[in-house]
Amino acid sequence: MRLPLLASSLLLSLAAFAQEQRPLRFSVAESWAMPLMKVVDGQATDGIVYDLQMRLAQKVGRRAQMLVLPRLRIQQLLVTGGIDVRCYLNPSWLGASHHQYIWSLPFMLQRDLIVARDADPDFSLERLRGERLGTVLGFSYPPLEPLLSNGDIHREDARTQELALEKLEAGRYHYAISSQLSLDWFNRNQPQEKRLHALAQVSADLISCIVRDEPDVPTQALLRALVQMKQDGEFEAILERYR
C-alpha cells in the first residue's frame, strides 16, 4: 500500500509545483523617492506605488517582484516584455507606444509645479528664461519642452526628486519642478520658514498603469482590481497614509 500512497503524494506535489505561478514583475524607477517609493540598497520597501503594487498582486493571488531599474532600462524591458506591470504613468511620458500592454483607467491626478524657496505671487514662466531649473534625470516635462529644447531654460538634473528639492533648498538654483506629492512630503518636517513654495502649476496629468497582455499575466484581473480599488476608496486610503 505504501507505493501507491507515495506515488499519489508525488503526483500531488508535482501538480502543486506546476501550478505555482511566477511573481508578477513590477517596474520601479530608481529615480523615484518618497512618497512614491522608498528604495534601500536597491530594494523597494515603502511608499504609495509600493503599497499599490503589493495590493494589486495580492488581489490577483500572485507575488510581487519589484524590479528597481534605471528609467532607460525600464523602457528597454517594456519593448521585450520583461515587465508585467508598470504603474504611475501617463501616455505623454512614454517615448513610444507599447502595443503588447493595455492601459488601466486613471486612478489619480499628478500636478507638476514650479517651486522656489520664496513665495512670489507675481511669478510667470517668463521668469525661467536664462535660469537653471532643478529637474530629475530621465523625467520629461512636455509643457516646458519648447523652452528647454531651445536653451531658454537650462536643466539641472538630479538623480531623484528629493535631491532636486534639496539642491533648491541649498541655493544651487532659484527654481525647480516638482510634483505636488513630492513637495508636500519634503515640506512636512520642515519648519515654516524653510518650507518651499509652489509658484505655478505646469501640468496636471492623469496617472494610470499599463499591464502586459499575454497569457502568463492575469491582465483583465489586474485591470479590474485597479477599478475596484478606485471605487472602494483603497487608493485614496493609501494616499492618506503618506500625507
Image (spheres, grey):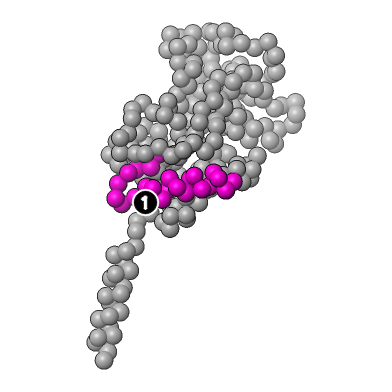
Report x, y in % for residue 129: 54, 8
Q: Is residue 84 above or below residue 145?
A: below
- Out of 172 and 142, give the one closest to the viewer: 142
In this rendering, position of residue 57 left or right of residue 167 = left
**Which residue reaches farthest bottom?**
1
Q: Residue at x 45, y 15 (%)?
A: 145
* Quadrant where the image shows the N terminus: bottom left
Q: Residue at x 64, y 18 (%)?
A: 199
Query: In the image, is residue 86 part of the stretch drawn in magenta?
Result: no
Report x, y in % for residue 113: 58, 23
* Quadrant where the image shows the C terminus: top right
Q: Quadrant of residue 5?
A: bottom left
Q: Residue at x 41, y 29 (%)?
A: 91
- Mark 1 Cα-neighbour bin, 10 Å: few <14, some 14–19, many ≥20: some
Q: Residue at x 60, y 43 (%)?
A: 236
Question: Does the rendering let one see residue 89?
Answer: yes
What type is the residue that disc 1 sits on? Pro
- Out of 201 and 101, give the one closest to the viewer: 101
Region rendered in magenta: 210-234
Query: In the image, is residue 222 part of the stretch drawn in magenta?
Result: yes
In this rendering, position of residue 143 left or right of residue 122 = left
Question: Does the rendering let one see residue 73?
Answer: no
Report x, y in % for residue 44: 48, 46
Q: Which residue is mark 1?
A: 218
Report x, y in % for residue 61: 43, 58
Q: Is residue 59 above or below residue 20?
A: above
Disc 1, SS:
loop
